[in-house]
Amino acid sequence: MALGGRLACTEGGRLPGPMLLEKDWADMPFDDAEEGVLEDTEEEKEVLRAPARLVAFTVEPMSCELEGAPLVSLDDSPALSAKVLRTGITPFFPVPPQPSGARLPLHVFLFVVRLPIFLTVAVGYFLVLQWLPLGSLAKKALLWIILGVPGVWWVDLQIDGVRKGSLAKHHALRLPQPSDVIASSFTSPLDPLYLAAIFDPIFTASFPHTRQVQRISLFHAIMRAFQNPQEHPPSSAELVDVRSLLRDNVGRIVVVFPECTTTNGRGVLPLSPSMLAAPTGAKIFPLSLRYTPSDITTPVPGSYWTFLWDFLSRPTHCIRVRIAECVYNAPKLLSPPLSERSSYATNVLDSLHGEDSAMTSSTETLTSSLDESNAEEQTTDGRRVLDKVAEALARLGRVRRVGLGVRDKAAFVEVWSRHPHRRR
């Protein structure tokens, strides 16, 4: 059997897709070594070979959908198998848990003790306390209690352009403020919980092919980390744009999850155009959240009990928060050098261009050449903003951008769910 080649080769520091597997894999650079990020060692390749064989023996129906991309045999080259996973579908795989070993009794004890306390505090907050007029500060304190029960006691915060110990001097410029937009990574149910405990924002659900978003509650945002990827909004969803949310909720921050679905944090998916509906000149802050241990991510839907075990059985957890410099939703304010502007386009950007084309095609006889030029300029400007945010998320997480999106993850989940004996 072989794996269909809807993966990508590096180009300009990212992984556009879909492309054919025709480049020399030996010359391809991969993730930099960093604490909490696996290196390309023989040990890691051994870890990755098991899921590689799973895909190689089960994904042939999926490979038929890859529009003629050549098939690459994984059994002939284990090293190639590892590189294929790191460059294409790696963000979709669950992170293997660290073996408990001699600490298993301790982990069982912590899980048994923490589970009733955690459920009591969490259920009490979401059913009762969040509806009481307690004030933002009191609600944030309660959310920190929910985080503290499982041992989330350490937060490593770094902000672009701010040295440690000098945050107060740059607070107004470097941190998201009311009426700003946060473009956050989405890897775990803890992401919205932490953001709510810090910023008390308005959460939204983004979709790949529309600039409109669905306003959701904190609880809904948490539960989306366990749900199947959604390429299109539900028929019952009330869609709005970010501009309207900021106008109707003065003094609040809006959070978007532009990847539209969860990953394991080892890649950045194509971004939704939902951020482009923010007011012109609005500040968009790319924000990356990663965890140590990293097995509390939920790239595969439905992993409720696995997450609870990993979350409640470990003595402590650390959240690594990285905030990039803001990106203005006004490309003229970005003023990037010509050499830094990218010439590629991902699937989502192609869809953006298609949407803009569809909007103008029905009235092309009524628009002048100047109007068409302005529309093309707006499309290019939108791509530039999305590229800037995506590049920042990839840099903050020390990962690559990939061309596989929500539709590809849905296909992967369908295959993965048919082999429960392979799930951890």
Image: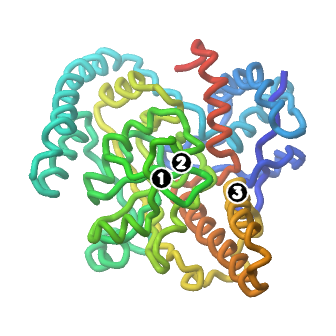
Q: Is residue 175 visible?
A: no
Question: What is the three-letter code of the residue carrying label 2?
Answer: Cys
* 361 or 290: nearer the viewer: 361
Q: Is residue 274 visible?
A: yes
Question: What is the three-letter code of the residue carrying label 1?
Answer: Phe
Question: What is the three-letter code of the residue carrying label 3?
Answer: Ser
Q: Position of residue 320 (x, y in %)?
A: 40, 51
Q: How far apart in space, not on screen, are marks 3 and 1 (Cα)?
A: 18 Å
Secondary structure beneath dot 1 equals loop
The answer to which of marks 3 and 1 sits earlier in the sequence is 1
Q: State the residue position of label 1.
A: 257
Q: Position of residue 266 (x, y in %)?
A: 57, 45
Q: Are marks 2 and 3 in contact (CB under 8 Å)?
A: no
Query: Circle 2: is it few (<14), some (14-19), or many (20+) Cα within 10 Å?
Result: many
Looking at the image, which residue is at 77% across and 69% down? 343
Q: State the residue position of label 3.
A: 351
Looking at the image, which residue is at 68% across and 39% down? 408
Per the rendering, the mark at residue 260 is 2
